Image: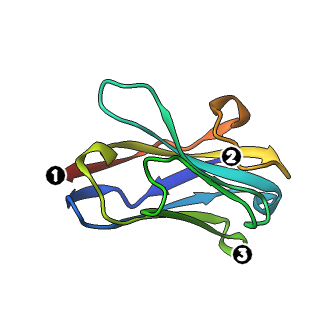
Amino acid sequence: VQLQAYGGGLVQAGGSLRLSCVASGRTFSNYAWGWFRQPPGKEREFVVAINWSGGYTNYADSVEGRFTISRDNAKNTVYLQMNSLKAEDSGVYYCARGRDFGLPSAHLIDYDVWGQGTLVTVSS
């Protein structure tokens, strides 16, 4: 399976972006999916995840109430709607495949396939 993430860009603080992650393969709907980010000079960190059915989500405290994850199994796509962006949201955003019928984990070890990343820059 391959993941293609896109939608990043430069936005002013307070603005919005929507990231998309398209997955190849026929078993997209069986998996949990997550978004992680890596701020400049820092380690990769958890942002949000969604379980295989879309019924459960898990958000990092720093994005709760501002970001929304969703999935469209018919399009093999997971989305990240980011509103009220802050400078500290800047970084490379990665989508990743979680466990088969898994829960929306916040742990990197639970993800086995990663996209190439898309850069989000929020200017203050």
Type of amino acid under label 3: Ala
Q: Nearer the viewer, mark 2 or mark 1?
A: 1
Contact? badges 2 and 3 (CB < 8 Å):
no
Tag of residue 98: none
Mark 2 or mark 3, which has the lower sequence index? 3
Direction bottom: furthest residue: 74
Residue 64 picture location, percent across and down: 49, 56
Residue 41 picture location, percent across and down: 31, 24
Q: Nearer the viewer, mark 1 or mark 3?
A: 1
Type of amino acid under label 2: Arg
Circle 2 residue: 97
Question: Is 15 left, or right, of 119 in this rendering?
Answer: left
- What residue lies at 49% left-to-right and 35% top-to-bottom? 45
The alpha-carbon separation of the residues under discs 1 and 3 comes to 35 Å
Residue 80 picture location, percent across and down: 49, 62
Circle 1 residue: 123
Tag of residue 74: 3
Q: Secondary structure at mark 3?
A: helix
Type of amino acid under label 1: Ser
Total residue callouts: 3
Contact? badges 1 and 3 (CB < 8 Å):
no
Mark 2 burial class by Cα count in 10 Å: few <14, some 14-19, many 20+: many
Mark 1 or mark 3, which has the lower sequence index? 3
Mark 2 or mark 1, which has the lower sequence index? 2
Question: Is 13 left, or right, of 111 in this rendering?
Answer: left
Q: Is residue 88 above or below residue 10?
A: above
- What residue lies at 78% left-to-right and 59% top-to-bottom? 52
